[in-house]
Amino acid sequence: MKITNAYVHITSPGRNFVTLKVETDAGLYGLGDGTLNGRELAVASYLTDHLVPCLIGRDPFQSEDIWQYFYRGAYWRRGPVTMAAIGAIDVALWDIKGKALNTPVYNLLGGKSREGVMVYAHANGKDIDHALEDVAHHKELGYKAIRVQSGFPGLASTYGVPKGPGRYEPAERGLPPEYDWATEPYLRHVPRLFARVREQFGEELHLLHDCHHRLTPIEAARLGKELEPFHLFWLEDPTPAELQDGFRIIREHTTTPIAVGEVFNSVWDAHDLVRNQWIDYLRMTITHGGGITAIKKAADFAGMYHVRTGFHGPTDLSPVCMAAALHFDTAIHNFGIQEHMAHTDETDAVFPHQYFFKDGYMFPGDGPGLGVDLDEARAKKYPYQRAYLPVNRKLDGTLTDW
Ligand code: GCO
Ligand code: MG
């Protein structure tokens, strides 16, 4: 089989998605997600202008060699744009292989290690009472694991909490919005939030919280320690992870499990974190981490150090990435949990898919390949719209991590 062509489709059914469609001379095609929130066109150009011309004529079964060709062969390695582009190609090749062999992708990765994949939902509210209502709502929907974020006194709005009615969506159309940040009231607030959640919902529910890279290691250590009585499933992105050594400080002070990696794009970003056992869950996604080929190696490496996967699954990764993640989660041994932010109805209609949610678990479906498609006619109705993630400033105006 030979690859005959590959096209990038950009569509914006509420938010932007970059999809690669790889076609073959066997009449089969595969899909890959290359969405990088706020930097979509850079990935599209990297694919169209640099990678696709080198892809035509290759055998889609040779996914390992093709991955190495684009990673090792490029000389300029890594980075989110490069790796999302390689990831889109790689996922499309696994989709083609599954279709050609008439089997779901999870069978190419070792077969089912579990029937369903435990997912966590997002509950949030402008204050603790509203957050508790949203936890109750998600519990009723069947979720066994819930991430809880809430606004707190002293700041008009914060990460994870919608400003108006409707679900939380981080990117905004136009130029980047600016938000305020204050660490001290946040640190006082979060233990109160989780005390109330445990008081109302008991011990059974798995609880998660995302710090979104806003603390220093010692601040994160304090928070992790104060959250210990509430037995979190994980505390996410407690501190920016460029300095992997910072996690040593957190680990020395608290037994609250730590998750990190949604902005990683290479196993090397997590090398020290994993081999020193400073983290418990690796969140690097299939799209941003360079595809199934790369993430399989990262997950196997993590497994040797008792680190499990907990893939990022926000609305800014398309249903193509979600499908790939669910096949992967179903197959690997050291799966931990999968994030699930439900897409809008418009997005689901542009990307018809077999995967589904039931009683707190998601299932990839048993059709060949990834079991996800792109409705091109519908996609064309939603042209690209420039949008950015917010930037953050401390109350004195200093730029800080968002
Ligand atoms: C999460 C994430 C997202 C990111 C978003 C950025 O845990 O789901 O932190 O909400 O902010 O994916 O594009
Ligand atoms: Mg996060």
Image: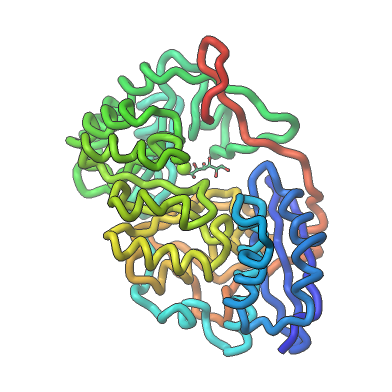
x 45%, y 48%: residue: 261
Q: Is residue 359 visible?
A: no
Task: Tell me if residue 195 comes above or below residue 6 in the rendering.
Answer: above
Image: 375 above or below 289: below
Q: Would you say 182 lies left or right of 380 here?
A: left
Q: How many marks?
A: 0
The structure residue drawn at horizontal position 22% and vertical position 38%, both measured from the top left corner, is 252
Drawn side of residue 345 relative to residue 243, left or right: right
Asked which quadrant contains residue 67, the reply is bottom right
Q: Is residue 391 left or right of residue 157?
A: right
Give the camera-side residue of 268 and 209: 268
User: Residue placed at 57% from the left, 13% from the top?
Assistant: 397
Quarter the N terminus occupies: bottom right
Which image quadrant is residue 133 in? top left
Q: Residue 108: give x, y in percent of width and height.
A: 49, 82
Q: Is residue 10 visible?
A: yes
Estimate the x, y position of residue 194 in percent, counting from the top left.
28, 32
Question: Which of the two residues, 296 or 318, is positioned nearer the viewer here?
Answer: 296
136 or 284: nearer the viewer: 284
- Residue 49: horizontal and vertical position, in percent? 82, 60
Q: Residue furthest front?
A: 75
Percent position (x, y) of residue 358? Answer: 41, 63
Q: Left or right: 29 with respect to 288?
A: right
Colour option used: rainbow
Q: Residue at x 49, y 26 (%)?
A: 158
